[in-house]
Image (tube, grey):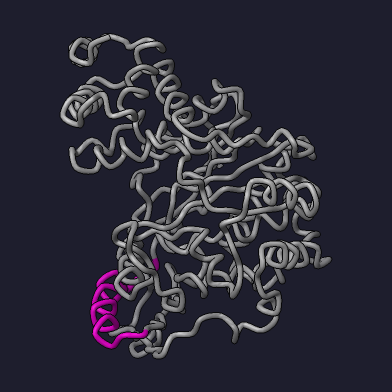
Amino acid sequence: MRMYDLIVKKREGCKLNEHEINEMINDYVAGKIPDYQMSAMLMAIYFNGMDNDETLYLTMAMANSGDMLDLSKISGIKVDKHSTGGVGDKTSLILAPMVAACGIPVAKMSGRGLGHTGGTIDKLESIPGFSTAISTDDFIHNVNNIHIAISGQTANLAPADKKLYALRDVTATVDQLSLIASSIMSKKLASGADSIVLDVKTGSGAFMKSTEASFALAQEMVAIGNNAKRRTVAIISDMDQPLGKYIGNALEVIEAIETLKGNGPEDLTLLSLTLGANMLVAANMTENVDTGIEILRKTITNGAAIEKLKQLIAAQGGNTTCIDDYSIFPKSKYIEPITADRDGFVSHIQTDEIGYASLILGGGRQTKESTIDLSVGIILEKKCGDNVKCGDTICYIHSNDKEKTVSAKQRIKSAYVINDTPPASRPLIYGGIDENGHRYLK
């Protein structure tokens, strides 16, 4: 096989077969194919696309390029959940204990945040003592023993994706549907789950800004999962304003704990219940989502979910007193309010700007080597549709640096749009893609 011939083949709009894609990915990871040739292939894919078979072959080749986690020693159907990323999205911290409290094994490998979106692993590390770097044996033991474990992804998980993504990032080939879907799903398939529930975000804080683009991505990923013999479904959820009220690592863990105690904001609670209920359906515990939601609500009211979170924290070395004593979380030096400069209604929040404001404060990383400040963030007091008076506090900035506070404040002020009339309401959940690949609307 010559890479030159494959580039020509794809440039002319022809289909690559499984053997060609496997050999191409293996040779690229091994350093036998230079970046300039792979860049040409990515651009050919960008313009000519890939069909379902090609996308599956690419996904599996990337998944098999490194470690494949074997969860066969864990009893029961293993269900994973993945979000395409957003601002204030801490649903994994809520739904994982709820689902585990129902006896469903939750063996979750999560990532770190990059850019304006947060990562589950960073959030968990704001719990004093909590370790996300546990061995595979301990990971499997914990899931069998308490039905839950959450760890960071291994360094050798889908290494082909790491190389390809870095190349896509500098060759303007990131936003191609098959390449996006195969990047996400290669890591999910390598993580070993039997079933996968996808939360595909849409709106100003999401990677896919339009609802139609989000549905298209969801459909592509569900097709990959099911073709790979993993039961896969997707939910399309709103990210045109932050989810919940707390943004920032330690702050989001606190909001997750409050939600498991029954005190969480409505949007965060409902989305966590809906995604978790889909996990129960995927694990064959219940036949429909509505029943699953009621089962999960009971884990909140009877205290089983918060107890499961406590077990998770203890099993991974964390200080369980954080459940009731928030003072042990990292704390920022300064808390500064931002106020409305006119009367009216919050008509829009440019969500990615809120995420970038948290990034400026130190709550996220601009490169993978950046150090995160776990204590900083933003607490929203007003969200879309809320009535405000001039001088009302719309949010609070938690910061450790006065100069960063000024920069973040400017972005937050510009992100909030206040008008005379309330905005049209947006649904929290737009619909989804079922396991048969059929689109449905809420």
Q: Which residue is more in the foreground, 384 or 263?
A: 263
Quadrant hosting residue 371: bottom left
Dominant secondary structure (helix, strand or loop) of the stretch shown in magenta: helix
The answer to whether residue 305 is magenta is: no
Q: Residue at x 22, y 23 (%)?
A: 41
The answer to whether residue 406 is magenta is: yes
Where does the C terminus fall, quadrant-wise? top right
Q: Give coordinates of residue 58: x percent, y percent.
A: 40, 23
Q: Give coordinates of residue 204: x percent, y percent.
A: 34, 55
Where does the N terminus fall, quadrant-wise? top left
Q: Is residue 31 left or right of residue 442?
A: left
Residue 349 visible in this rendered orientation of the protein:
no
| Number of marks drawn | 0
Quadrant hosting residue 273: bottom right
Residue 328 visible in this rendered orientation of the protein:
yes
Q: Residue at x 75, y 36 (%)?
A: 73
* Residue farthest right in this picture: 302
Q: Give coordinates of residue 30: x percent, y percent.
A: 33, 28
Q: Is residue 15 left or right of residue 233?
A: left
Q: Which residue is more in the foreground, 162 or 301?
A: 162
Q: Residue at x 39, y 68 (%)?
A: 422
Relative height, residue 231 to residue 345 (above, below): above
Q: Which residue is more in the foreground, 356 or 24?
A: 24
Q: Give coordinates of residue 127: x percent, y percent.
A: 58, 72
Which portion, as a residue range, is magenta? 400-422
Relative height, residue 317 to residue 334 (above, below): above
